[in-house]
Image (tube, rainbow, N blue to C red):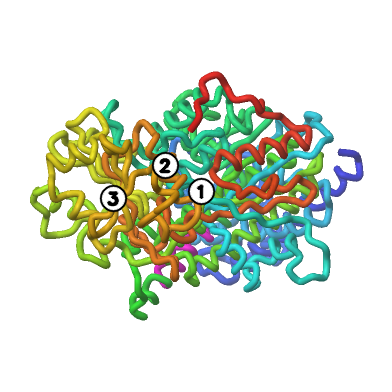
Amino acid sequence: MGWRGVAGQIGRSVTVWAVSTLTMLLLAGLLPDFRLQSPDGDSATRIAVTAACGAGAFGLLSALVWPVLVRMLLLVPALFLGLLVFFLNGSLLLLALRLNPSGRGEVAPETAVIVAAVMSAVASATGGALAVRDDDAYRRRLLRLADRRRRATLPCASTPGLVCVQLDGVGHDVLTAAVRDGLMPTVARWLATDGVIPPTHRLTAWRTDWSSQTGASQLGILHGSTYDVPAFRWYEKDRGEVMVCNRPTSAAELQRRATARTGEAGLLAVDGASRGNLFSGGAGEQALVLSIATRRRGRENRSRAGYFAYFSDPANAVRTALSFFAEIGREIAQSTRARFAGAHPRVGRGGLYPFVRAFATVVERDVVVAAVMGDLLAGRTAVYADLVAYDEVAHHSGPDSRDARQVLKRLDRSLALIEKAAEHAPRPYRLVVLSDHGQSPGETFRSRYGLTLTDLVRAGSGLPVPRGAGRTPSGAEARAAVRAALGREDSESGPAPRSEPVVLASGNLGLVSFPDVPHRMSKEEIDARHPALLPTLANHPGIGFLLVRSAEHDGVVLGPCGTEIPLAELDERPGPLARFGPGAVDAVRRTHAFPHTADIMVNSWHDPATGQIHAFEEQIGSHGGLGGAQSRPFLLSPLTLSVAEEHGEALTGAERVHGVLRRWLGELNGPEVPLDAGPERRAA
């Protein structure tokens, strides 16, 4: 930075200090518990000097002391860090007034919180407005927010880098509708929907495997393998353990298995960054990554360590904290309106859910976006980030609800911020936006039929059914991020009772396992043990089809009225799979070959006309199985990259998406994952 840059920086600092002084004077006149003069009164000059000294001291403390406090607070659960922001900021103001050389200035502790919050917000807005007008200053500001000082001084390649932003749960049809309705102007500009300017991006739909959820899709996208991931949660008989994709220990194990299977470290193995994901992708830079949340050595290895880069700026912390509480109020208002309006379908949105939603739509979004901007300005070659805001809201409000559509607006603004940061990066970037799955709407199984899948399995097995239907745990990704931030493990990971079936839900996909039988039971064995179970499930109106192993036919699909079709005959007569669309037969066959597929795989009913399903979890927008928009995510890529669908073939499976991204990295002369599969990779 030359003398002109130094002079500009000094000028901006003086301007921010002057505005902060005026803000302090104004607040002193408005708030009765805050004064800048002695009880006997002072001259206007003396009061102005007191305000100037107080503003200067507060600014210095914010710049010097605040980052130290936040670093110490990495041991505090990240979800609570936002709640401490106001208290810490107010404490700094009290200290600034104590250090004021004028000897004047007094404020009540509760008022100090308000004064400090307003001053931080005003200082941030002023500094940001001034910095945006100066490209170098804007770049330095973003670098500081993302804590990339080490990389800022290092040279980077001149070839284009690749940044991938995952909009969790946003289906292809939801995105196109949002663009059409003007909710996402940034994406609309890329696609040139107005026809005025030429497009810069192309939109491609792709199809998930049977397990249409983030665990399988993101593992496939980042690590090239979805093998043996039959659902979001499943029981492994050989280990006596429930695997849950968004539990840190399970995520770490799944990443280990995928790496061993492919013989590759991952998509981001060379000069990559992984932000807000379940898996690392082999990246050297990781923040808010669930698969490393259980590591305890070093700040870099902990999932919540990435919060420091964002919250080290007090103005950022105050702004996010204010938005956090505003989002809580928004959720309470929206859920109250839905309840009084008699909205149907509807699920409970009380308890801690408003806080979980605020964490997903505000804290996680702000931290991840800031980290991505820092990665771009640091010149990293490959970046992959996940924004879970829409997925969390759509689970409880519905994928097409007004609540979820408002989230899409804010996600579009996040994409615009990332695009702006790319303009100031030291190398060109290609911005890819994609989703891992969609969501399908519908009334929950429990709400529609008055019992859970567990109740139905117990009834068919001749076991007592509790009178009060229980609730199933939610598989929303945001809840995993909150648990990781709190440093807690998932309670559903313990061993199952060996005398009763284990029933697990993954959206509208259910899995039934018998833990006391060491192998995957066949239809003949299940019928001999529980003659009424399979007919009870197959003939229930809320269930679409079952998959079970067969001693005679290897595997069979069961449907109502005694339908039983061997897997080898599904091409000629798909039976109940016909209503689930193209790709369903291949998806079922592939899952059947997994070592940890459940004894009974249960897919809920699906209406092809409306796209509705019945989730076995308490979600009115869900994903995890077959049926509707959940299996149809999108891939939005620059026209400068090759077409995703080579030779006109439909893009099917997350492993294929991994191959596409790997090909694009090669086109950009970035790090290439070897095209040849590792020696341990098997046909799947």
Q: Are marks 3 and 2 in contact (CB under 8 Å)?
A: no
The residue identified by callout 3 is: 564
Q: CA distance from mark 3 to mark 2?
A: 15 Å
The residue where tag 1 is placed is: 208
Q: Quadrant of residue 231?
A: top left
Q: Residues within 10 Å of mark 1 (few under 14, many from 20)?
A: many
Asked if residue 225 is positioned above or below residue 471 in the image, the reply reads above
Instruction: Establish if 682 lies above or below 304.
Output: above
Q: Residue at left 27%, top 39%?
A: 599
Q: Is residue 48 left or right of residue 438?
A: right
Pick whichever, 670 or 205, lies toward us: 205
- Depth check, front residue: 52 or 540: 540
Of tags 3 and 2, which is closer to the observer?
A: 3
Question: Badge 3 local density, few (<14 within 10 Å), some, or many (20+)?
Answer: some
For the point 85% across and 43% down, which residue is it? 6
Q: Earlier in the sequence, mark 1 or mark 2?
A: 1
For badge 3, the amino acid type reads Glu
- The vertical placement of 370 against 345, above or below, is above
Residue segment shown in magenta: 321-333
